[in-house]
Image (cartoon, rainbow, N blue to C red):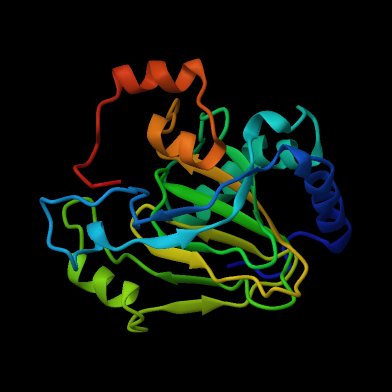
Amino acid sequence: MLGSLVRPEAVARLNGEIVERKHATHYSTQVINPYFHTAVNPDYPADNPVNTFIERSSGFIPGDAWDPGCATDVLFRAPEVARFIADCLEIPALYCYDDPLAGLTSNICDPGQQFTWHFDANDFAVTVLVQPADEGGLFEYVPQIRSAEHEGFDAIAGVLAGGREGVRTLELRPGDLQIFRGRYSLHRVTRVGAGSRPRHAAIFAYTLEPGVIGRVERTRQLFGRVLSQHEEAERERVRSDALLD
């Protein structure tokens, strides 16, 4: 986490762009497991994380709501930003997540909402908190709780049951930039207080390879729709791991 990397005047501009587009937010309330599945899987025990479901009740502003040239879009697509993030992670290169809906988003948690424990589909996400909640809305995560070769069910089950082993809490401030590997780290945003202002965060997603597009099922869950690019990518998809997602 890089504290106060985005200056206050830029934070205000980013939040203004979120507020302008908030009408485009797709809100959904679902009961999901950490892999965004909604149905019981009889192949796994009842107490397995695959069959542990928790409410998710937040919203996302989709990528196609952002005008080319707006500050949020420019920041996401700037080659200097991707280079900076790659240098921080000590990897050769990063690419903007090519998903037209999920590459550049804003997560909205209104009063009473939460984004429960889950994993991301993309490799890396950069989050800039632009408006914190007055109560709740804390970012919690368990770093590297699974790998490409191992699901880590036992450790995940402990966290879902309320255990705190390995759980870290970040009390982010406006302008803090967080670099996060959510593919392997279980994470959530805690419930925003009923009397709180909404929590707004800009999310920039990056991948290790160019041209990556998200899966149809998760895209429909988060944004309420899919585009032709998602359907085409689904037909041609070759998985790089065997994770449940």
Residue 122 sits in which quadrant? top left
Extreme-bottom residue of the structure: 164
User: Observer-nearest residue: 2 or 240?
Assistant: 240
Task: Using the image, determine if residue 124 lies above or below residue 235.
Answer: below
Q: Is residue 97 left or right of residue 123?
A: right
Residue 2 sits in which quadrant? bottom right
Task: Using the image, determine if residue 216 lies above or below residue 57.
Answer: above
Q: Quadrant of the N terminus?
A: bottom right
x and y percentages locating residue 124 in the rendered image = 46, 49
The residue at 74%/36% (across/down) is: 74
Q: Is residue 215 something that shows in the picture?
A: no
Q: Is residue 19 left or right of residue 202?
A: right
x and y percentages locating residue 101 in the rendered image = 57, 32
Question: Number of numbered discs present?
Answer: 0
The residue at 34%/23% (across/down) is: 234
x and y percentages locating residue 166 in the rendered image = 35, 80
Q: Is residue 124 something that shows in the picture?
A: yes
The residue at 24%/57% (across/down) is: 50
User: Observer-nearest residue: 72 or 233?
Assistant: 233
x and y percentages locating residue 77 in the rendered image = 65, 35
